[in-house]
Image (cartoon, grey):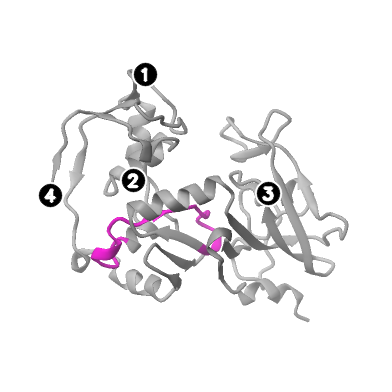
Amino acid sequence: MTEGSYTSVSIEEIGISSSKQRVDNFLLGKFKDLPKSKIYSIIRKGEVRINGSRVKPHFKLSKGDKIRIPPLFINKHKPIQNFPEKVLVEEIKDRIIYEDDEILAIDKKHNLAVHGGSRVSIGLIEIVRNFGKDYREAQLIHRLDKATSGCIILAKNKQSTRLYNSFIRSNQIIKKYHCLVHGSWSKDLNNVKLPLQINKKRNLPKIIVSEDGKYSETNFRLIKFNDYYSLLECSLETGRTHQIRVHTSASGFPIVGDLKYSSIALNKEIERRMYLHCSSLEVTNKDLKITSKVPNSFFEAFED
């Protein structure tokens, strides 16, 4: 039998610390033990109200807003010895590449979701919160797609979460990626500006290029190429969902192993994964640069 209890309906007033935060992120931070799918479900059904009105998940809170939170069933937190993925906890601990009093950075392996949800029972954030008592309040500062590997930063407490979220908003965290794409990349193609928007048709990719979309810009540097593949370094001027994946695909060079934005079959001799890796994160006002080595498999396409 699952241990837990129901909360009561509550009305909370938003303070300055939560001002400008998205309502979904506010609730995800407040109810860490709830699946992400449950949070989005109560928002979508209108059970969460801001000043008496229904809102979308991306609605940004303001100081003084009153948020209605419906009754929720909260499981009691289970200690690490009862955690079903204890082996995975130790594996992820071994992938820590930086840690201080505020944050830790992990070299995320590919095919690991950053959080659990309706299709994923457990993700990186749930694993980290089971490292021990000092990590119970850990929060994601940014996200990587499940299929993307590399650097990801997590804050260790609420104060650090607010601080690093402000760094994200003020563009003080610079991300660089490496990707392997199909085709021989044009040496002159060092910048792509294509507006992106969410696709509302279920039978097509999640993000599409559209004149009505948001301004999106990616810089590219060609590192290595042959007649079949190219290795690129990518830096983001904007941070849209799937930005690198869509910009490379729309330019005629889809990322190898990207099942959403490429129809090209993988070479059987290449590891089956999506070849996108976050290779560095630089926190400019902290003089901090965190790096992750590009996997050897990214270079196998160029071996004779």
Q: Quarter of the image containing the C terminus? A: bottom right
Which tag, 3 or 4, sits closer to the chain's start?
A: 4
Membership of 156 in magenta stretch = no
Rendered location of residue 285, percent (x, y):
55, 59
Rendered location of residue 207, percent (x, y):
62, 39
Rendered location of residue 91, percent (x, y):
38, 74
- Label 1 environment density (alpha carbons within 10 Å; few <14, some 14–19, many ≥20): few
Q: Main secondary structure of the magenta part?
A: loop
Alpha-carbon distance for marks 3 and 1? 34 Å
Kind of element beneath mark 2 = helix
Left or right of 71? Residue 89 is right
**As drawn, 104 above or below 167:** below
Front tag of 3 and 1: 3
- Label 2 environment density (alpha carbons within 10 Å; few <14, some 14–19, many ≥20): some
- Which residue in the protein does label 1 denote? 53
- Which residue in the protein does label 4 denote? 3
Q: Which amino acid is tagged 3?
A: Glu
Kind of element beneath mark 3 = loop
- The residue stretch that appears in magenta: 129-151
Membership of 140 in magenta stretch = yes
Left or right of 68? Residue 2 is left
Depth order, front residue of 85/211: 211
Depth order, front residue of 37/49: 49
Tag shown at residue 237? 3
**As drawn, 190 above or below 45:** below
Depth order, front residue of 136/273: 136
- Which residue in the protein does label 2 denote? 29
Which tag, 2 or 1, sits closer to the chain's start?
A: 2
Alpha-carbon distance for marks 3 and 2? 27 Å
Alpha-carbon distance for marks 4 and 1? 33 Å
